[in-house]
């Protein structure tokens, strides 16, 4: 049971981080465009407008995905409660991999939204 609790907590870290950072990015993106923290792609770093837009958009996406993944993680981990350590570890690893796919996959809609709202030089299309 101890290992199951460890795996549950481990698998909740990514959704919780997405929820916390999602809220933070929506309200307070990093003030300066930088290569160390924040949503950093070539398009998001064009200028302050693209930087703020990308953080707000990705923040909303992470907040939503984070809550969905948090609930689904708890529900899915209940299926392996009391199972063998090997089963729990394999299931937890697969679950973590799926979470990473959603985290990394959030780049696609964010970049698409940037492309729809800004030209290649970072000028607003509106």
Image (cartoon, helix red, strand yellow):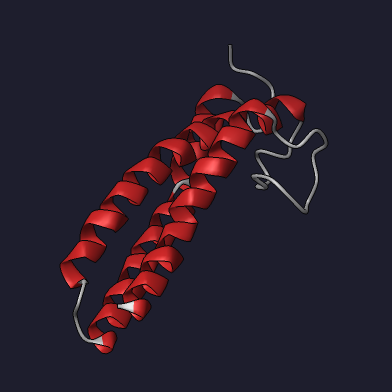
Is 102 located above or below residue 50 in the figure? below
Q: How many marks?
A: 0
Residue 73 location, quadrant: bottom left
- The reply to whether residue 52 is in sight is yes
95 on left or right of 46: left
Q: Nearer the viewer, residue 16 or 49?
A: 16
Q: Quadrant of the C terminus?
A: top right
Q: Position of residue 68 (x, y in %)?
A: 32, 43
Q: Could you tell me which quadrant the N terminus lies in?
A: bottom left
Residue 79 pos. (x, y %): 16, 66
Question: Residue at 43% of width from left, 64% of height from top?
Answer: 9
Q: Quadrant of residue 43 in the image?
A: top right
Residue visible at 69% across and 22% down? 123
The answer to whether 102 is drawn above or below residue 45 in the figure is below
Can you name the residue that lies furthest to the front here?
1
Q: Nearer the viewer, residue 76 or 120?
A: 76
Residue 125: name its quadrant.
top right
Q: Is residue 125 left or right of residue 97?
A: right
Q: From where the camera sits, is residue 122 visible?
A: no
Residue at left 27%, top 75%?
91
Q: Residue at x 66, y 38 (%)?
A: 44
Give coordinates of residue 18: x percent, y percent. 50, 47
| Nearer the observer, 59 or 68 | 68
């Amino acid at each position: 049971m101890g290992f199951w609790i460890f795996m549950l907590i481990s698998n909740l870290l990514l959704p919780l981080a997405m929820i916390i950072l999602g809220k933070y990015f929506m309200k307070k993106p990093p003030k300066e465009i930088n290569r160390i923290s924040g949503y950093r792609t070539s398009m998001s770093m064009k200028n302050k407008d693209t930087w703020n837009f990308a953080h707000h958009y990705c923040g909303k996406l992470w907040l939503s995905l984070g809550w969905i993944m948090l609930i689904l993680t708890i529900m899915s981990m209940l299926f392996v409660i009391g199972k063998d350590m090997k089963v729990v570890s394999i299931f937890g690893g697969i679950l973590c991999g799926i979470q990473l796919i959603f985290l990394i996959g959030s780049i696609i809609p964010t970049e698409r939204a940037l492309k729809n709202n800004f030209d290649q030089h970072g000028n607003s299309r509106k």
